Image (cartoon, rainbow, N blue to C red):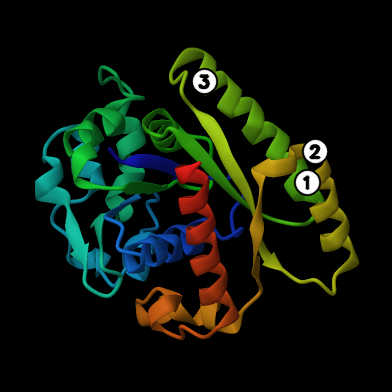
Amino acid sequence: MAKILAITNQKGGVGKTTTTVNLAASLAAMKKRVLLVDLDPQGNGTMGSGIEKRDLTATVYHLLLGSKTLPEVRQHSVVGKYDVLPANRELAGAEIEMVDLQQRETRLRDALQTVMEEYDYILIDCPPALNLLTLNGLCAARSVMIPMQCEYYALEGLSDLVNTIRKVRAHLNPHLEIEGLLRTMFDPRNALAQQVSEQLQQHFGEKVYRTVVPRNVRLAEAPSYGLPVLYHDKASKGSQAYLALAGELLNNSAQ
């Protein structure tokens, strides 16, 4: 039975897609069966997995609207060694078209039910907004990973996201939990980053992952090659951080 994890933060540029792609590749390298769901109309998770979004004839957009089945939409990332439900710009129109549909918040969850036995992990890359697409991700997931930079405004956005998760749990998905907070683009020389990191640990305790993802050139370069960083430069600090995160996730699941 797959563990479904939504990777979300309504703030843009915090490393959601980077985390989804590289965590998927790291889990796959550990012999886990992984499905990456790209819910972001920018399609960066699709491109980062080595899949050309402009060539797609079936995407997660068609899955949500019910015009294609999951097997028709699913692609295999040869470079990452995991499966992908890809996205492109078409997905931006899905929100408007889904407004009048029945069970509009749970359409992704219903689609994923058909493949739960085929995967160990399903990772959902949510867009940087609290919209109907993100809501579909939160309704489908059992837990939420929140990537965030250690800066002042991040704390403010975090309280909004925690409130949203509470509302989703109360009205749509009673099983939803915060899996953990992931500190990304971390620079240990920055005093503010250290300060915010300490505040997170004080407030959220064990919910903060021990793994910290540093600022890393190789990590930033990898998407331009359509590769997870593991296959761009395995020895880089970014690659090692995501392998460590995958290990931490597996250990938490085993407990």
Using the image, determine if residue 37 lies above or below residue 187: above
Left or right: residue 152 compared with residue 144: right
Give the residue pinned by disc 3: 169
Using the image, determine if residue 2 lies above or below residue 84: above
Q: Which mark is residue 145?
A: none
Left or right: residue 34 compared with residue 228: left
Q: Amino acid at mark 2?
A: His
- In the structure shown, which secondary structural element does the residue marked by tag 1 occupy? helix
Residue 212 percent coordinates (x, y) = 66, 63
Left or right: residue 183 compared with residue 220: right
- Mark 1 vs 2: CB contact within 8 A: yes
Residue 187 percent coordinates (x, y) = 76, 71
- In the structure shown, which secondary structural element does the residue marked by tag 3 occupy? helix
- Residues 130 and 202: in front is 202
Q: Toward which corner of the image does residue 211 lie, by quadrant?
A: bottom right
- Mark 3 vs 1: CB contact within 8 A: no
User: How would you rate the neighbour count of disc 3 (Cα within 10 Å): few for under 14, some for 14-19, many for 20 or more?
Assistant: some
Q: Earlier in the sequence, mark 3 or mark 1?
A: 3
Q: Which mark is residue 203?
A: 2
User: How would you rate the neighbour count of disc 2 (Cα within 10 Å): few for under 14, some for 14-19, many for 20 or more?
Assistant: few
Q: Amino acid at mark 1?
A: Leu
Give the residue pinned by disc 1: 200
Distance from label 2 to label 3 (Cα)?
21 Å
Q: Toward which corner of the image does residue 203 lie, by quadrant?
A: top right
Residue 64 in sight: yes
